[in-house]
Image (spheres, rainbow, N blue to C red):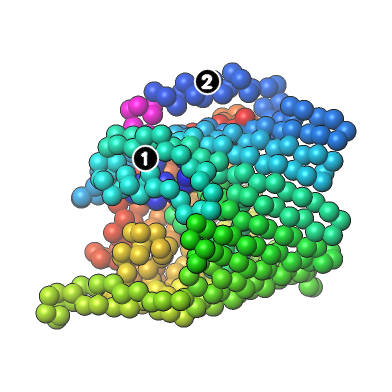
Amino acid sequence: MRTKFRNRREVAGIGVKSVLIAPVLLMCIFFFSASPSFSQSREIVKTDDFEVKIGGYLKNLTTYTYSSEIRGVDGLSKVRLKLEASWKRKIKATLHYEIAMISGESLKDEATREKLSGDPDELFDLYWGLNSDRYVVAAHTLDRAYLSFFTDYFSVMVGRQRIAWGVARFISPTDLFNPFDPSDIDKEEKLGVDALLCEIPLGDFSGLSLVFAPTKNMDYASYAFRLYTNFLDYDFGLMAGRFKDREVYGFDFTGQIGDVAIYGEFAYNMEDDIDSYLIEDRFAPFGFSVRWTKGEYIRAVFGAEYVFSNTLSVLLEYYYNGKGEANRENYNFTALAEGKELTLGENYVFGSLGYELTPLVRGDFACFYNIDDQSALFSPSIEYSATENLYLKIGAQIGVGDMGSEYRLRPDLYYFQVRYYF
C-alpha cells in the first residue's frame, strides 16, 4: 500500500487481524524464498544476454499511541515483491508490487479512512483499494513500474520510479518529488512518481538530469533539471524547475573537512498562489483571525557528520524554513494535518547518535528541536539483526514542550517493527 500511511497518527503497528495474518505471510515467504545464502535479491534466470532477479520483503509495524485525547494500537502489515529483468545491459524493466493492510484505532475516524484509501494524484492508476471500513483498510499497488534504456551517451527511465534529489538527512529543500517526513519511522522506500527521467553524463562525476512528471491534472505537472559535478573533491549540484504549484531554484553540496562530512542545500521557492488560514486571536471579534501564507521564501540546510572508530556516529543538522513562523500563535496547523507542510516553525536543529552495541545490535537516538517554540521530539530506537535477513526494531517518539508548541501537540508513540527480506 502507499507509504502515505507513514503519518504517525495514521501509520503503524497492527491490530488483532493483522497479528494473525502477518506470521502466516512470513512463513509462506520464508518457505518459498529461503535459500542457503539468505540473499536479499537472487537471480532466477541468467544467460549471456538476459537476466532476471527477484527479491522483496515483509514488514510488520505495531504502534501504541498515547495522549490525553488519543490512545490505542494501530497497525500496518505489507509485502513487497521486486522483479527486475535486463537484456544486454541495454534495456531493463523494474516492477515492485506491494500489498498492505492497516487496522486499528485510527480507522474509527472517517476522515482518516478516506485519506488512507484515496487514489494518489499520479498519471497512471496503479493503486487499487481492496477494503475500507472502520476496522481495516487494505490496498495493493505497483509502486515501481518503469523501463530503463541505456546508450553510450545517455539513459532514459520512463514510468513509476523513485526520484530522490538532495543530500540532507532529515529534511531536503531540493528533494521535491514526494519528500519524506523527518519523523517517518520507515524511510526505506520513497514514494514512486510517474515520470520521464533522462540522465546525460558530462564527464567523470558530472552529469545532467532532466525530469518531466505529469499528473492527472496537467496544470500540476512537474519538470526540472539538476546539473551536478565534482570540484576539489566536493560534489556540487544546481537545480531548477516547476514542482506542481511553485517554481524552485536551488543548489546542494557535499564534501569533507578532515574526517568530518559536511553537506548543505539551498532552495528559493516562488508559489503561484497564497492561501488563507485561521489562527486563534482572542482580540478578534469571533476569537479567530485570518492569516495568509508566504508566496516567496527560502529553505536551507547545513549539516555535519562524524563517525568514530568505535562505530559511534554523530550527526547535526540546522534547517531554516522560510515559510514557517517564528511565533507559534501564527502556525498553520491545517497545512501540517493535511500533509502540505512538514514543519511549522522557522528554525530547527536535528541531531542523531548511533552506536553498534554489539555486531548484531545497534542503538540510535534522534532529536528534532524547534528553536522558535522550544519544543522537541525525541526518538530512541534499538535494532537487532536476528539473521542476515531478519531485523527486529523497537522505538518511541516522545514530544516535549509547552502546550500549543509544535512537537508537544504530537501524541507519544511506541512501536515494534519486524522486517524480513528475501
Identify the residue position indicated by label 2 in the image.
27
Residue drawn at x 51%, y 46% is 125
Q: How many marks?
A: 2
Residue 75 visible from this viewpoint = no
Q: Secondary structure at mark 1?
A: strand
Q: Return the x and y of residue 228 as percentages of the image width and height.
A: 73, 68
Q: Amino acid at mark 2?
A: Met
- Asked if marks 1 and 2 touch (Cβ < 8 Å), the reply is no
Residue 114 visible: yes
- Which label was assigned to residue 63? 1
Of residues 126 and 305, the one nearer the viewer is: 126
For disc 1, the neighbor class at 10 Å (few under 14, some 14 to 19, many from 20) is many
Element type at mark 2: helix
Q: Amino acid at mark 1?
A: Thr
Q: Above or below — where is 354 with respect to 127?
A: below
Is tag 1's residue or tag 2's residue first in the polypeptide sequence? 2
Residue 86 badge: none
**For residue 315, what is the image quadrant?**
bottom right
Residue 220 place in picture, x, y as percent: 50, 65
In-image side of 397 versus 150 (left or right): left
Query: Which contiguous range is marked in magenta?
Result: 14-19
Q: Is residue 251 above or below residue 60?
A: below
21 above or below 140?
Answer: above
418 or 277, nearer to the observer: 277
What is the spatial separation of the Cα atoms under label 1 and label 2, in whole angstroms? 22 Å
Is 74 in front, or is 391?
Answer: 74
Is label 1 or label 2 in front? 2
